[in-house]
Image (cartoon, coloured by chain):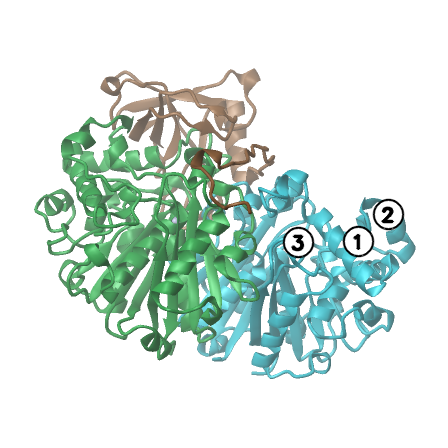
Chain colours: A cyan, B brown, C green
Amino acid sequence: MDHIAIVGVAQTGYEAKIRNKTNYDLVYEVTKGVLDDAGLSLADIDNIVTVSNDFMDGRTISSMAVGEAAGGHDKNISTVEGDGTFGAFYGAMRVLGGFNTTLVVAHSKGSEGSLKHITNAMFDPVYHRLIGIEAISASAIQANSYMDRFGLSEESFAMVSVKNHQNGFNNPYAHMPLNLTVEDVMKSARIADPLKLLDCSPVSDGAAAIIIANEEYSRRAKTRPVWIKGIAHCVEEYFLGDRDLAVAKSLRQASRKAYEMAGISRPVDSIDVVELYDAFSYMEPLWLEGLGFCEEGRGPGMLKDGITLMSGKLPVNPSGGVLSSHALLVAGLARIIEATLQLRGEAGSRQIPEAKTALAHGINGPCGQSHCVWVLSSEQ
Amino acid sequence: MVSTELGYDQLLSIAFSVPMPYEWSVGVYGSLFFHEIMNHNRFLGVRCPDCNKVYMPPRRLCGPCFKELDELVVLPNEGTIEAFSIVNYPFVDPNTGEQRPIPYTYGYIRIDGADTIFSHIINETDTRLIQVGMKVKAVFREKELMQGNVQDIKHFEIVNP
Amino acid sequence: MPGSVAIVGVGQTDHRSHRPDVNGREMIYEAVQRALLDCELSINHIDAIIIGNMDHFESINYVDTWSVEGSGAIMKPIMKVSTGGTTGASVAIAAYYHVASGLFDRVLAIGWEKNSESDTTGAIITCSDPVWDRFSYSGAIPSLATEASAYMNQYGVTQEDAARVTVRDRGNAVNNPHAHLRKPVSIHEVLASPMLAYPIKLLDICPRSDGAAAVIFASDGIAQRITPRPAWIKACSVRHTYTWFGDVDYKQGLVSLQRASAEAYLRAGIKSPADELDVAELYLPYSYAGLKWIEDLGFCARGEGAGFVEDGHTDIAGKIPVNPSGGVLSANCIGATALLRVGEAALQVMGKAGPRQIPDVKQALATGFGGCFWSDVLILGSGRP
Ligand SMILES: [Zn+2]
């Protein structure tokens, strides 16, 4: 793979309802922000990938609303519907395939639609949709089957929520930093057993953008480039009943491929910091297993042993993760941005000292049916 | 053994007509536009200082110049028909979930002093009485019925020369 | 330098107004199987998949993850690319970059739609801005009708001129076993068909179809081993110029197509498109586009489209045959439509277009149209770039 790098990042603050701004406003602000960050002008950008979802925006061809705000008036442009990590993946391929610089921008305003309806629409219209299953109830089934398989406790998931909401205080963009105890999480409203309110991420409004550049343009940008070493994604079966929900099979495959590209054989030793897609507390340990950081069923143990704390050997979600801010589609791009800031040494009070290699992760579909893994490095 | 053969008239389908509720932000520029209608029965546009184009309704950016705009201009309630179409086919209107009454005239109107086109309804469905280039004027809703949306303009009507 | 990329296999369903015998996944599977069969590959050979459609036509969110049984994506990478009417071309271009990046060698592009599953106009209306346009907008037809009326006004073009485009495309569809509408029509029939939105009549506009398309892309070295005559991608270029319907200036022509095709010609080294291209598969969703947009593509000068078509230059035996497949006027499964243009152009270059084959095609053009008067353009050729 040719040398390509992330040379600019920008994100809005994440909030429950950004009432004074449309999607167009949000996209414009991060587009301007990412150009400023990189020290590049729109003329330096030769192509654009926008990320949006027609259900989220309540609009067919949702990309139409933001093309101009993304600077796409007279440029080669395309749109990925899905998490921002997938949009960024396409952006990276476009640089590897001949463009100089891709600007990738994602937006969503969860406050404008009904997430129950929107995520219900992920499920099969013939067999499942009319039953009323949506993201939270499906995830509850996954959490249950994960607990049952490995004898895990609800408290072990609650600890993730405590850690990530606490980390959120170090992130000026976070929607919901909270000072919690395991007891607070356990006592919060039972939403869909075994998930309680504080096991679930909030729904946020927000937008984020990155610029991916080839080697030549990475030298023109004013930022310290963060090199893309390994990228891969993979999907598994669709029907929940066809899947083993207690094991992240497609994530194993995607991470194996990304590590191979990056020349990593022992991820737990090679990677300094992880930003992963923890839409629910149980997801963090389950994805850590899928990422090969520990044996199956051992994910919760990594936190109990202090490994994933800010002070641990492998800090996970120092930004507060998705549990602290969850703008759908944007959240995966935010993981890449947080990993990039860590490697630039610009993560402020959430900085992990001397981070050289970072992992970012995003998901698509119900219960992490599809995973995208990014290995990034401060060294070329 | 049950066979996979099945007659065409035996094939089933499942109806799904659940509405998806949304509440869309209008944004600063759009809100200003609707307040201007509610308070003064008139339109607002915004001028790009680089290319001098006047956008109506006003918006935050000039796309070609990629420039943020803030020079609001008051525009008249009159404009010219740039193009129109008398719609004759039935369809379910997603705004209401009901069949939209036909025929009705969808019009592209260039408000005097604006460089972009505003689309709305024109209250003339007779092809003999409507032409590209005709002057039209906005007819607003009664003040107490205004809600701050595009239906605060009832329709445009042709201005007799 | 990115590597060269070629199309090696094409598959499509037999498009119909209604396919109640299959669900969406099953219909996708039909096209994928036909594409694999076309180039004698198995799904195990495919490294990555791109899929596209328009969410609200079937009301399915995350089509990438929903479709995996039909697309064959299980335990592979799949992503969804969706840009409205241009979706099929955007999917093809995404497949191109998957291979050109060097990350994947054999990539499957899928476009599909089951338009029978919703009220197409009702769904298209939701593409208009909910604050500004949704109240008055009534779908693609009036939007195109306004373009047509402005064009007629500008150049004195008649309804009869436009009817010739329908007659040509519907006549060509007789040679395409996959087309939805395969009955030829006369100028008189077009003119006598019911007026939908002046000046567009029923036979001036595309049908709504159920169908899927699948196209397989491969890298240099591998493509030649799969098929003796791959269709190489020489250029792909995109302009989604507008965000607001009110910004479109019809008097300037279809600006996005002018710009995208100019960039594509430059990359492919084409100076005189009507002479150097051997065939064009154009996304012409209505007859008037077949006059106006060939001007924007530089086949003839501004205002000369009607004469160019009337003189037979776009007929099967003409200077630059347009839509030997029957085009969009004969089948329109929206998410698949632009990918069908790319697939049909590839079949022409590969010499595999059967009864609709134009002899000795060396260079072919495919376009996509959609969104807010947007254009995607691809140029395919028999020689490796
Ligand atoms: Zn300007």
Q: Residues within 10 Å of mark 2 (few under 14, many from 20)?
A: few
Identify the residue at the far left of this view.
C311
Residue designated by label 1:
A199
Between C164 and B31, the one nearer to me in the picture = C164
Specify whether disc 1 shares its chain with disc 3.
yes
Between C231 and B10, the one nearer to me in the picture = B10
Identify the disc placed on residue A262: none
Residue designated by label 3:
A240
Mark 2 residue element: loop
Quarter residue A166 falls in: bottom right
Query: Mark 3, chain letter?
Result: A
The vertical placement of C197 against A25, above or below, is: above
Kind of residue sitting beneath label 1: Asp
- Label 2 or label 3, whichever comes before in sequence order: 2
Give the residue displayed 36% in from the left and 58% down from the top. C11
The location of residue A262, given as percent across then percent down, is 59, 80
Looking at the rendered structure, the number of numbered marks drawn on it comes to: 3
Kind of residue sitting beneath label 3: Leu
Specify whether disc 2 shares its chain with disc 1.
yes
Q: Residues within 10 Å of mark 3 (few under 14, many from 20)?
A: some
- Label 1 or label 3, whichever comes before in sequence order: 1
Q: Are marks 2 and 1 in contact (CB under 8 Å)?
A: yes
Identify the disc placed on residue A188: 2
Mark 3 residue element: helix
- Label 2 or label 1, whichever comes before in sequence order: 2
